[in-house]
Image (cartoon, rainbow, N blue to C red):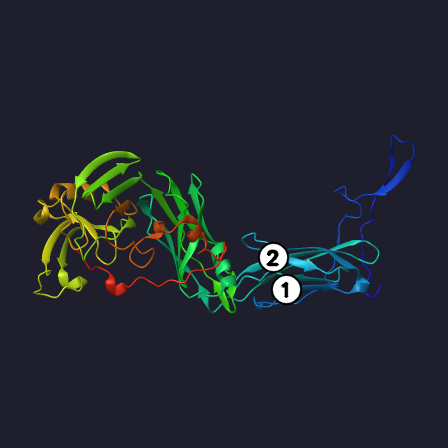
Amino acid sequence: MNHTPHIRTVVSCTLLVVSLGAGAAACFGSDGNPLAANPYDAAEQISFNAPSDSAKADPDKPLEITVDGSDGRITDVMVTDERGHHLAGELSADGGRWRSTAPLSAGAKYTVKVSMEDEDGFPGTRTITFETAPSKKLLTVQFGPKAGTYGVGQPITAELTAPVRDKAARAVVESALKVESTPAVEGTWHWVDDKKLHFRPKEYWPAGATVSAVSNLQGVKVADKLYGGASQPLKLTIGDRIEAITDAGAHQMTVRRNGEVINTIPVTTGKPGFSTRNGIKVVLGKEYFVRMRGTSIGISAGSAESYDLSVYYATRVTWSGEYVHAAPWSVGSQGYANVSHGCTGMSTSNAAWFYKTVREGDIVKVINSAGAEMDPFGNGFGDWNLSWDTWRKGSALVAGTRDGSSPDDAARLRPQV
């Protein structure tokens, strides 16, 4: 032996009489396990590469624990941080070295418990604590929308403070962003671009559901020198299932609550050259008064198509300025012809009812229009226009990634009528 002799507790031996006839002697410790009474302090045999003083460990370097082969072998290692997360590692075949196989978290405090056996088979232990240095570059997440009650079509958004392009790094981020719903739903994240993700279920959220989103990125290594930071969780509630289906060909909107028709409204939609977009849109907000100008959508002042109107009960469905709103000037065409510049117009009384009935996240779907399809991203929430298979392909944890563009901020607040 090349280490200091240990003072070991004498292990009591008890003669066991078994029903098979023969007597046998066995040695037990106080917990009933052979040779487990009062393991000795193995501080002299077990070595760590973590700092033993107040210095912080580099989280980019793996944790290594070793024992001299002539002193025995390591039998077990447990490494946990203050949140109870375990650090994975690998023990060599001869028990001489344990090395972490998962990255350490930055700015975390770890407790390390090592068990070993010396060359005579006696158990020893050593426990240490150490802290890792905080990262100078943090990735944090801002969830959206703000807490509240929303319609069944509302996606969850996650805005990152730094771009994440590498597929493996995206998988780390995505696996740490947890969304839970009661009742449970099938859903996944979709990478809109390098800094933005959307989460939606396979189908619309169940009416009355509660939805929460939380980031477990804090301290997690995302990429070289980039670690996750703390982020605020989000909790939403889902209201009734409100769906407004606008048939541009029939000039009529049908509004359903939880599958039951609650109103049928004559409307006018976009005329040729300004046809309303087809597809599923999500209510983005409501504005009692909006001043709408043709110049905001590229119509020259003084041209035959020019307009400057005061509009009331305006429910926004795209950032570029598509609304459902009161259009008293076109009541004679509502239910018969499409005469707007892209919005869905209706009488003032119907617009007031619609304005009071819907909330953010409710569904507005346009069918049978000559317009283009609603863009999935960049002009509101067109997420539901992607099939479930296509949506899942935008997840780094499912298959591949999708490059997209950020919303055109210059296009915001451009009303159309």
Q: Farthest right residue?
A: 22
Three-letter amino acid code at the position of disc 1: Leu
Q: Give the image location of residue 60, x and y in percent.
A: 57, 68
131 horizontally vs 1: left or right: left
Position of 118 relative to 49 (above/below):
above
379 horizontally vs 156: left or right: left
Residue at figure coordinates x 77%, y 44% from the top left = 33
Q: Quadrant location of the C terminus?
A: bottom left
Q: Which SS class for mark 1? A: loop
Position of 331 relative to 175 (above/below):
above
Three-letter amino acid code at the position of disc 2: Leu
Residue at figure coordinates x 35%, y 43% from the top left = 237
Residue at figure coordinates x 62%, y 65% from the top left = 62
Which numbered dot is residue 383?
none
Residue indicated by mark 2:
87
Residue indicated by mark 1:
63
Position of 235 relative to 159 (above/below):
above
Q: Which SS class for mark 2? A: loop
Label 1, label 2: how far apart the Cα atoms are: 10 Å
86 horizontally vs 347: left or right: right
Q: Give the image location of residue 307, x and y in percent.
A: 10, 59
Residue at figure coordinates x 79%, y 60% from the top left = 72
Q: Give the image location of residue 246, x and y in percent.
A: 23, 44
Res 227 visible: yes
Do the residues under discs 1 and 2 have CB atoms within 8 angstroms? yes
The image quarter in which residue 334 lies = top left
